[in-house]
Amino acid sequence: MFKNTFQSGFLSIFYSLGSDPLQLWAKRVGSPPSASSSKSKQSGGASSSSSSTGDNTLQSTSPPPPPIEPHVDFVVDDTLNSQVLELLSTHLPSTFITTPSLATRTLGIKLPILVFLVKNLGKYWSFEITTLDDRGEKRRFRASNFQTSTRVKPYITTMPLRMDPGWNQIQLNLADYTKRAYGTTYVETQRITVHANCRIRRIYFSDRLVQESDLPAEFKLYLPVVK
């Protein structure tokens, strides 16, 4: 997609206030896997135990909490007071956005720094980046806030993700990750997939690590106050 595009400075691939924020993305909203079969088995086991004891006493139990309705929708965030994208589901693998939207295409982004402006919703969250190195190998980097340690395998590295409450700026140096994990040189990013659960303001690449105070106004998490 961007292979033949001049790449320097900043390259935004998602902005929640853009005219068509998901133009480069495909989204999927799936339901959690059905547990009816397991419930049926558990029910059978319980009835067998009940018949042996003869105990028909009814016990009062609290109703289960209502399930989260999976969705990928734009909402107005109460902190930023503006539109952001919310991904919500109890089953992370089934609800996500991914770019490019076509499985046969690749991003071709050579900029090494990837930045997420995302909100911690206090729920499980993960994302995955597919890169290409100078050996022609595809490497995947998967980060999640439920992983406890880094694990490096030949074609995938899983990493823990530590987030502060509320909005976060997450910076990933993909060139450094590739060198440290595989001893190879980062060439380009080919695909990004973001799973539930989070809110997203912007996702962008840059050619170097930049302090937030030095960012262009439109790339900062909080828009400057106009006096």
Image (cartoon, rainbow, N blue to C red):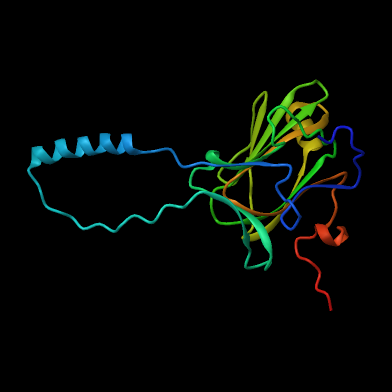
Tally the marks: 0
- Kindly identify the residue that appears in the image at 55 percent across and 56 percent down: 122
- Kindly identify the residue that appears in the image at 47 percent across and 42 percent down: 31
Q: Residue at the far front: name it.
A: 19
Check the picture and name the quadrant holding the C terminus: bottom right
Q: Is residue 88 visible?
A: no
Task: Give residue 49's position: percent from left, percent from top.
Answer: 15, 38
- Kindly identify the residue that appears in the image at 60 percent across and 39 percent down: 149
- Is residue 123 positioned above or below 127 on the image? below
Is 20 on the left-hand or right-hand side of 61? right
- Is residue 128 positioned above or below 81 on the image? above
Is 63 on the left-hand or right-hand side of 178? left
Q: Residue at the far bottom: name it.
A: 227
- Kindly identify the residue that appears in the image at 64 percent across and 26 percent down: 153
Task: Give residue 186's position: percent from left, percent from top.
Answer: 82, 31
Depth check: give the residue in front, 103 or 139.
103
Q: Is residue 105 visible?
A: yes
Is 90 on the left-hand or right-hand side of 215? left
Check the picture and name the quadrant holding the N terminus: top right
Task: Give residue 164's position: percent from left, percent from top.
Answer: 64, 58
